[in-house]
Image (tube, grey):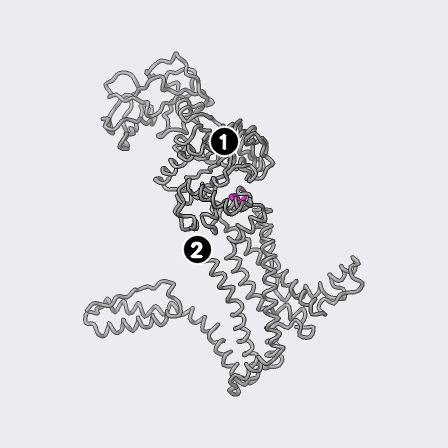
């Protein structure tokens, strides 16, 4: 009886969900061959042995995934379905009660909307600003890489320090910004930047912009560097001015990386926490309470870990919903280029 | 009036001069090939004419009008890039018509001119394709069609064939020659390939080290190289060079003779240089006989197929006086003086 044909190696493409299942079936197949085929010789056993060693190579990744992703996720789902407090988790099964509570809470829904609006808007602004900065560097000095590394400074500052620095800058009494505005005579009395909803959001956005735009600019610079050679010169000869070259040539050619950069920034923006924590503590009122911050307060201050878990899962689902179109867009743009 | 007129054109990067004062007139309808070794400044010169590089000094006139202060697009020329530089996100039609779209032409007119340009280079069936779906040769033709669509006064080519394989290069070369004949366009063509230069040019401009070494018809340059550099640059295999003193030619420093002008006789023959055949390259239509003279000079003779020379054989090498090229110490050609002593080596 001829041995069944099996490929010793699968392509990396196969390393998806079906991978483990396929591996297992194949291992069982080898074992079955070993038991039922008389011709299954020493060589066959060696192959079986080699095959059984293969899961060992996967073990590190599998362990990491289980510890960092699978376990917390299962724990979170279990928590959200339970009656728990921080001190005494899993006291009873609560069904979907936590979800119902969360979705019935106007303030939670409001925080979700705030967070989504802030993430989309701030990311769009930062990608636009970062791209403008990168274009400037790219055209002004082609050897602008040195300047680019200076750009990393804000990025290397711990977020908490960024928050503290901006809090000092924005402080009504003796703050740098208020002092300057007063000296220039632009205002008569110190402005409470963090005291009104609109200004507080603007302050957070400004600090966020300061911290993240350089990073976006570096990514944009890399995207610009990947433009095909000569295309810009060709467009110049074809009579396209700077704006037309940007609009018809550069932008379409970096659209795919730009979508990816936007996606990264969007995910970062959803995680906004430190700046609200330091600058406004979610205030005034709940005006700058993002979902991440509200979940933190719910769990760590009110010890409502079960409801916090439910809110976290709802939030995660929402992030997926918002980022999905961007992922799709990125894929579509990339396919266009391939 | 000349189509292009360059006077005193110079370019330096910081303190490094790359183009050192170039004067050149190109007549309307002329096919001029700028050729030279890499780094000789020929591509820089082309980019200066196109307006993609600033000048350090000099003037460029196109159809009598100084274009130094004009943007590239206003100079009424088009360029075919070495990398083709097609717009990867536009179809073939989009590529060819981009300049017209920017110029704000009506759609029907753009469409008409795109089709006309595409027909010139036989691209009709491919107008809806993207560059990524085209072969190297087809991309090249799109680049040419894009240049033609603008109906420029002058066409610039920057090493357009260097990304093609040998067979395709030959084919495209013929295609470009045909195109020039059909369009009667003024063409300035940069290459480092002497075969392209010899076959395409009405006039070759050979550059070396930022200067024009010699300009003239291909045969001019081949038969009467003005300098040692030109003599060495053109011709495959390269010209054979001897110290003139050894050859008994007073006044000259170096004497050159092309491989096809060397005459071989067997060793019993009187006169000529004694040499030994090192090895033979068989090319089918010709044979390249590599020789080593008694003074250890390596020379090559081009002989017809079927000539009898074999490796290891001793031969006598001679030539006809009118085939000698004589150069002075500075590498400048010495005009053929009548009093040379024929065929007798020292």
Magenta segment includes A264: no
Q: Residue at left 77%, top 65%?
A: A190
Give the main secondary structure, helix, strand or loop, of the magenta stretch.
helix
Tell me if residue A156 can be seen. no
Percent across and percent down for residue A83 are 54, 85
Residue B64 at x, y = what percent? 56, 29
**Most foreground residue, A197 or A180:** A197
Residue A338 circle label: 2
Q: Which residue is mark 1?
A: B209
Residues marked 2 and 1 touching at CB (< 8 Å): no
Compared with residue A73, is residue B181 higher up or lower down, i.e. above or below? above
Residue at the spot x=56%, y=28% of the render?
B7
Whether residue B238 sits left or right of residue A337 in the image: it is left
| Rendering quarter of residue B73 | top right
**Vertical arrangement, residue B36 with respect to residue B117, above or below:** above
Q: Can residue A134 be seen at all in this image of the molecule?
A: yes
Q: In screen coordinates, is B290 left or right of A185?
A: left
Q: CA distance from mark 2 to mark 1?
A: 42 Å
Q: What chain is tagged by disc 2? A: A
Chain containing mark 1 = B
Which residues fall within the magenta stretch?
Answer: A232-236
Image coords of residue A130 (percent x, y): 59, 56
Which secondary structure lies at badge 2? Answer: loop
Q: Nearer the viewer, mark 2 or mark 1?
A: 2
> Which quarter of the rendering shows the N terminus of chain A?
bottom left
Quarter of the image with the C terminus of chain A is bottom left
A136 vs A202: above or below: above
Q: Quadrant of residue B177?
A: top left
Judging from the image, what secondary structure is the residue with disc 1 in?
Answer: loop
């Amino acid at each position: 009886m001829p041995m069944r044909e099996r490929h010793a190696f699968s392509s990396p493409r196969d390393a998806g969900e079906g991978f483990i299942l396929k591996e297992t079936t194949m291992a069982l197949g080898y074992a079955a061959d070993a038991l039922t085929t008389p011709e299954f010789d020493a060589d066959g056993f060696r192959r079986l042995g080699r095959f059984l060693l293969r899961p060992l190579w996967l073990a590190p990744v599998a362990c990491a995934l289980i510890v960092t992703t699978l376990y917390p996720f299962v724990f979170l789902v279990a928590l959200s379905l339970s009656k728990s407090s921080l001190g005494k988790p899993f006291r009873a099964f609560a069904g979907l009660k936590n979800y119902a509570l969360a979705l019935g809470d106007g303030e939670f829904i409001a925080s979700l909307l705030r967070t989504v609006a802030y993430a989309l808007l701030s990311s769009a602004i930062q990608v636009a600003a970062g791209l403008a900065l990168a274009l400037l560097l790219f055209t002004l000095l082609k050897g602008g890489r040195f300047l680019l590394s200076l750009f990393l400074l804000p990025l290397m500052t711990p977020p908490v320090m960024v928050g503290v620095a901006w809090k000092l800058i924005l402080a009504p009494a003796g703050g740098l910004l208020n002092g300057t505005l007063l000296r220039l005579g632009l205002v008569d009395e110190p402005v409470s930047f963090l005291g009104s909803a609109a200004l507080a959001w603007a302050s957070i956005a400004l600090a966020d912009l300061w911290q993240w735009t350089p990073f976006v600019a570096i990514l944009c610079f890399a995207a610009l560097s990947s433009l095909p050679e000569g295309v810009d010169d060709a467009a110049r000869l074809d009579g396209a001015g700077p704006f037309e070259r940007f609009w018809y040539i550069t932008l379409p050619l970096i659209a795919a990386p730009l979508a990816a950069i936007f996606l990264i920034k969007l995910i970062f923006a959803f995680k906004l926490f430190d700046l609200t924590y330091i600058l406004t503590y979610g205030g005034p009122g709940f005006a700058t309470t993002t979902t991440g911050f509200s979940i933190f307060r719910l769990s760590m201050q009110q010890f409502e870990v079960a409801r916090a878990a439910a809110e976290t899962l709802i939030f995660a689902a929402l992030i997926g919903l918002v980022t999905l179109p961007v992922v799709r867009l990125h894929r579509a743009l990339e396919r266009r280029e391939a | 009036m000349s189509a292009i007129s360059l006077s005193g054109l110079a370019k330096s990067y910081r303190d490094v001069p790359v183009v050192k004062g170039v004067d050149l007139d190109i007549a309307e309808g002329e096919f001029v090939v700028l050729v030279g070794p890499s780094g000789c400044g020929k591509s820089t010169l082309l980019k200066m004419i196109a307006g993609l590089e600033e000048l350090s000094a000099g003037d460029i006139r196109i159809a009598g009008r100084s274009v130094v202060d004009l943007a590239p697009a206003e100079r009424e020329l088009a360029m075919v890039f070495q990398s083709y530089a097609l717009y990867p996100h536009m179809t073939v039609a989009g590529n060819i018509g981009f300049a017209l779209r920017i110029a704000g032409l009506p759609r029907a007119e753009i469409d008409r001119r795109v089709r006309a340009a595409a027909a010139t280079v036989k691209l009709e069936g491919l107008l809806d394709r993207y560059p990524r779906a085209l072969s190297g040769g087809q991309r090249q033709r799109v680049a040419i069609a894009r240049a033609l669509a603008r109906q420029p006064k002058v066409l610039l080519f920057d090493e357009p064939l260097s990304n093609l394989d040998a067979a395709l290069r030959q084919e495209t070369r013929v295609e470009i020659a045909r195109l020039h004949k059909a369009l009667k366009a003024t063409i300035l063509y940069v290459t480092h390939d002497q075969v392209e230069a010899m076959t395409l040019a009405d006039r070759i401009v050979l550059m070396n080290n930022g200067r024009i070494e010699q300009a003239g018809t291909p045969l001019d340059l081949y038969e009467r190289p003005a300098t040692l550099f030109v003599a060495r640059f053109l011709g495959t295999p390269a010209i054979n060079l001897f110290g003139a003193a050894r050859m008994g030619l007073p006044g000259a420093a170096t004497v050159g003779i092309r491989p096809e002008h060397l005459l071989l006789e067997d060793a019993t023959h009187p006169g000529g240089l004694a040499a030994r055949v090192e090895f033979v390259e068989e090319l089918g239509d010709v044979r390249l006989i590599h020789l080593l003279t008694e003074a250890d000079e390596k020379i090559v003779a081009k002989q017809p197929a079927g000539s009898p020379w074999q490796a290891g054989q001793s031969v006598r090498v001679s030539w006809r006086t009118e085939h000698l090229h004589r150069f002075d110490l500075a590498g400048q050609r010495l005009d053929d003086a009548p009093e040379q002593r024929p065929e007798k080596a020292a």
